[in-house]
Image (cartoon, coloured by chain):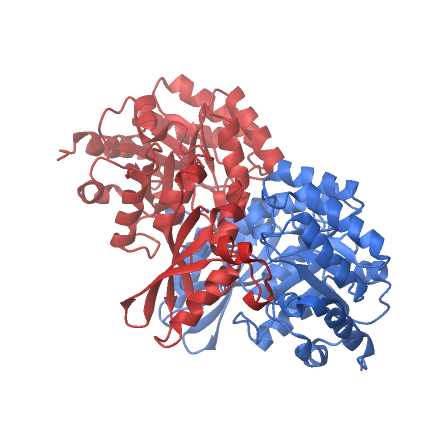
Chain colours: A blue, B red
Amino acid sequence: MSRLIATYHVRSDARAIAARAQGIAVEQSVEMPLSAIEDRQILDDIVGRVDDIREISPGLFAVRIALARATVGDDAGQLINMLFGNTSLQEDVVLHDAELPDDLVAKFAGPNIGFAGLRERAGAGKRALTCSALKPQGLAPSRLAGLAARFARGGIDYIKDDHGLADQSYSPFAARCEAVAKALRESGAHARYVPSLTGDLDALRAQIAAAKSAGIDTVMVQPMIMGLSNFSRLVAENRDLAFFAHPTLAGAARIAPPFLFGKVFRMLGADALVFPNHGGRFGYTPETCRAIAGKALAEWHGLKPAVPVPAGGMTIHRVAEMLDFYGSEVMLLIGGALLDARERLTEATAAFVETVKGYRYG
Amino acid sequence: MSRLIATYHVRSDARAIAARAQGIAVEQSVEMPLSAIEDRQILDDIVGRVDDIREISPGLFAVRIALARATVGDDAGQLINMLFGNTSLQEDVVLHDAELPDDLVAKFAGPNIGFAGLRERAGAGKRALTCSALKPQGLAPSRLAGLAARFARGGIDYIKDDHGLADQSYSPFAARCEAVAKALRESGAHARYVPSLTGDLDALRAQIAAAKSAGIDTVMVQPMIMGLSNFSRLVAENRDLAFFAHPTLAGAARIAPPFLFGKVFRMLGADALVFPNHGGRFGYTPETCRAIAGKALAEWHGLKPAVPVPAGGMTIHRVAEMLDFYGSEVMLLIGGALLDARERLTEATAAFVETVKGYRYG
């Protein structure tokens, strides 16, 4: 029977790790005493199996567990449930990675247009992409549209909503889409608006309809808040849209970000992966960031690459350093630091864009 | 302007806590430098405000932050986004609790029938409720139905799916509902079947329709996997159903379980709250468990109480101790330990039920 291989990092005493690993294998499969299982076939084909235990540093073990493909079915929510559902409630363990069989990955779409498609839409050639963010929340659609026009005149490629923007009374979603899209058309620039979708699946569909009716072809989603199953459904229903995935509520360290963003979000259809860059407001290390970018771009089950979007307190002063670090295979996102230029917003944006365009890619 | 008060527990140096608290207030509201905000109204009404900082143990601070009600709108997903979205990516902080304004809580239903309704349906009077679980996964519907009948003949009140049971090829959801419901009818006992719902909102609705058509009036959901907005939507659409909330993927310690389960899940409509009991397979302390039960039952914005369901490796030997601990205001859930009785499943269930019925409630 086909298996997926989940790798957990477990803090444990060396004498206890074998039993702890077996405990995870049971928790993530049949969740009951094996002595109570009468069926040979369930013991053979359904119960999780510890494949390998390796000490990677003192007191920290990499545990590889083979989980039955059949328990997942074709549902993205059930995939994360079987990989980490109850085990997420135990503090000694992190879901580090998983290897998935081809037929499972093939149930999902991967990115609709991927990094190459996002570059092509922006006419960006082989350079890094640029992005900024509309905020603060509390502004009316007309004010956000004014900011968008100034970003656009500075030459930015993509303008995403701050992930706090939803469908609030002071900035209703549909009115915001109309206002920003109109301002971008009138700017004559090539920038694309990426509104943030929120709510239940019905609300998400209604927002996509409103965005499309405003001529928008790229949207941002919050997979850990909307539910992975709903994310997957929206991607399948909208093959013409590009999706930015935002990391909100993705927690820190309990599910390894390179796996969650670079594999799961990409597999479910993220074209662009927003994540906290090292040295900003969040604690991700350079190694974690490099691993996220690596996974997002790597050949994996034939899926289109997604573009890594390191963000979170970035400034124009860091552009060269970030391009040194990530190369051209990246979308740079600077939000608040451009807005902080206030009346010089267009000029600050242009300086950001020119730095990216003028960088000597190796 | 109306505010919600979020309390975070932050590990910090005493000299750094004021700036760190202000950082969280900005992160969870406008997410940009305040120097870039031109509007007085946004600074006054939208930006998060640090209300209080108190050291609760050396190096650990309780930080109260007032967040604008207006940023949440009426959406449950946006509520958790504004309470903990980006801050969940920072390792030094836990969302401990939140006080919500009446008009926000009133947007949600709370439990449809609550603890009292679950007791009434079971004809349980004032005693504790009993519950068991169908597993292992891998069994066909007819086999699960056979187990259910034996639990029922033992006198159990509720029989829930193991949360790993979904809509897999070896046990399709609709066929399972039909088979288990029929077996329970034929048993002549009063037990109710509580199937576990999975998938996107469309799939969840289809499963509810299948469950109702089999005569089922209680279901289990996984709020952190399905998305809080979708949970809230299902409760609103199905006022006749009772909902068990399962804690899968709820993580450990990053959102305090008493808040997440006892307030948020209850507010969104959980009638019964399954959580890991202390001393079982999970690391929750007795204090955490007591706090979860306390929040589930407490008077809070006029919502119906939800019944706490401590679980996870419980055995019949712990029943008296658990009733001493929780009193009669509880549903006891024993799964694998009853199944481990194998051919004596009905007798073991009856012993469990009799122990609960015969306990001298104080």
Give the quarter of the figure containing the C terminus of chain B. top left
Which of the pair A163/A185 is nearer the observer? A185
Q: Is residue B114 above or below residue A301?
A: above
Residue A41 image point, x, y percent: 52, 44
At a point 31% along the width and 48% down the height, the residue shown is B277
Q: Image height check: is B17 above or below B129?
A: below
- Residue A90 visible in image: no
Residue beneath the point at 22% across and 33% down: B356
**Picture layout, residue B330 above or below residue B180:** below
Image point 59% across, 59% down: which residue?
A: A260
User: Does any portion of residue A45 appear in the rendered image?
Assistant: yes
**Residue placed farthest to the front in the image?**
B40
Left or right: residue A44 versus residue B193 is right
Indicate the position of residue B299 as horizontal and vertical percent values: 29, 37
Q: Nearer the viewer, residue A144 or B145?
A: A144
Count of numbered circles in the view: 0
Q: Residue at x 39, y 71 (%)?
A: B17
> In screen coordinates, is A179 left or right of B263?
right
**Residue A185, percent from left and from top:** 83, 52
Residue B218, quarter of the rendered image = top left
The image shows residue A149 at horizontal and vertical percentages of 77, 58
